[in-house]
Amino acid sequence: MEKSGSKGEKWMELHKALSSTYEALPKNKNGYLDHQAVRYVLHRLFVQRYGWYIKGLEPNGEDWHHKPAPGEGSKIQDWVPSFLQNLLEDKAHHDGLDLSELVSLAAALEDLVSHEAESRLKTAYQIHDVDISQSMDRETAEDIVRTWYVGFLLAGNFSASSPDEVHQKKNVFARKYSDWSHADEWLANVEKEEYAKRDSTSSSFESNLKTVSRIGQEYFRFNDQECSALKSTLKGMEGKKAGRVRLSTFYQKSLYSHWRFTEKADYLRKLGALDESDPKGQQVIVTNYMMARPNCLEASGLYAVCCRNECEDLMGHLEGEIKASRAEPKRVAELVSKLSSDTVAAPRELSPALLERLEQVAASNGGEVPLHGRLFAQWMHHAYPRECPYPHESGTVSPQTPDEWMKETGASDSSASKEEMRQQVESDVCAIDENGKPKGAGCEEAEDLPWSQAEELLSQPSQVEDLPQASEAEEELPSPCSLDHPCDGSTQPMARTGFRWDALAAILSVCLAAALICDYWYTSVCSRHTKADVFYVNTVSNKDLACKFSLCRNALAAWALASLAWVMDLLDTGIFACSMVGGLCVLGAKRAGDKFGQKKEMRKL
């Protein structure tokens, strides 16, 4: 990666942002971050910088020491981070990444997002029948940027076949979109600030690209305002337990106000937002619910914009102070007692129960507190119940969208009906009245939050040990037979893998490239209404992915990266050939599965 100019500045900025967390994370036996730790630190980075929950990095209740299940990562958005990391690891010839490689991976992911924004802006230009090479006045530029912005806010469910149609649809959108006036005002302020930086009032494609890129990077600041209102509302609905709202109160608010708290209990359970530890009634976990997928904007094929995890900021402070992956409980308690949050004042005196729990965490881990384990995350939830989410045990929850949950369960809707909500409210004998007190007798609510002793570490601690040196006799032994070093009776390995393997790999690569180009052409045909390109941004469903331009481009980019790595002898020929075969199989299965449903789906749009 370049270290000069704007790219150099970007690299150094990412390096500075990642360094403190990198130093605090546990390393593997080689002194590098393993796969799961890389996912964790990159997730933290993009959430803190842009409010992006990168698909494939987001926490899913299985991230403490997670191994992908068969079939996981089948969507390109999920496997792109892993693909890039594996490519870097192959290049460096070790298991894991150092800080420099971590920065390069973060920069590569940012570049993917930038390319997606550029592609969508080009499509917006095409809808407006404007050539990307021409300059334009401010009014025309703002019109095109708003087309991009509407598609961003609609999570991709926006299409048009002509300039007249796009204007008509934008007017309908403005009337129906909740709080559009504030969203449009925020956009106008961004545009005003961007024009203030320019020497002229005319706009080029490059200047408009800067504007839409900034929208993607800073929209979370506007979204934070809505999240703050949501948090304040839920806080006002709490009972005695901080960060908990009875399910009956949750539904009652939806029945008699503008708030739409309608998720079914089964769906809340799957999201990890339902606390069932109290036999007297189910409760919604405020922090887990706020960050759940129903409250996210699926603005991109690569990321979603969700309510920020405020605990990330608290953890960042602790990591910066401790500068290690583990600490004495006394040191942790000292720092936390001085650390304030949105709803917790500091300095404060930690309760005896909280201090005792911290000692239990240390006792379970050899006398020190691991900062990146499930027990400490649970302790932080007790210390900051309205900022830190409750960490469920691995495999018990999943961050599914409503569509994904309905597809998995066969349910017709993820929302409870008004009748179902009324039944929940009426059946709760311990429901909270308007004064915040339980209506029924014997329903006094305990203040203690649930606690589980199950520990799960982000990365198993390993000491970087000096490997024993081989003896002279061992050094003289010939290398074993392998694909790269076949036994041919000589002491010299054959060149790479032999002509036949190289030829086969090259043929497979050309076949996959041809198949991807055909798939791209087919996608472009499916994504047109008459002569104009459809402004179509895919959602998280598999059906939408079939007609998504960026999926095809990302797939072609992945092919190009893998081929380049193989040509430069950075990727093993056997692995490269298998990946080409896998790509052909996935593409074939995709085409077969979409053959009968794709045209029908596009007509709906």
Image: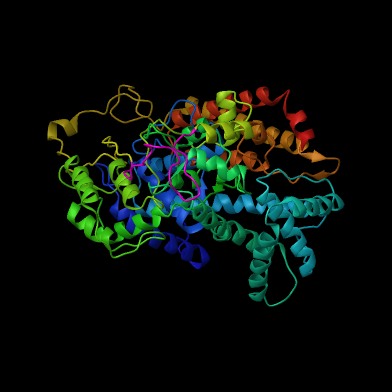
Relative image position of residue 2 (x, y in whole percent): 48, 60
Q: Quadrant of the C terminus?
A: top right
The answer to whether one can see residue 83 in this image is yes
Q: Residue 264, located in which quarter of the rendered image?
A: top right
The answer to whether residue 99 is above or below residue 261 is below
Residue 137 in the magenta stretch? The answer is no
Q: Quadrant of residue 75?
A: top right
Give left or right: position of 108 versus 222.
Answer: left
Q: Is residue 115 left or right of residue 373?
A: right
Query: What is the x, y in percent for residue 324?
Result: 24, 54
Magenta residues, as a range?
428-449
Work out whether residue 507 can be spotted.
no
Q: Nearer the viewer, residue 215 or 436?
A: 436
Residue 288's place in the image compared with 179, above or below, is above
Q: Where's residue 64, x and y in %?
A: 34, 39
In the rendered image, the residue lying farthest to the front is 441
- Between 521 and 471, the one lying in front of the other is 521
Q: Nearest the camera: 348 or 443?
A: 443
Magenta stretch, overall SS:
loop
Position above or below: 196 against 477: below
Residue 206 spot, x, y in % from top left: 67, 63
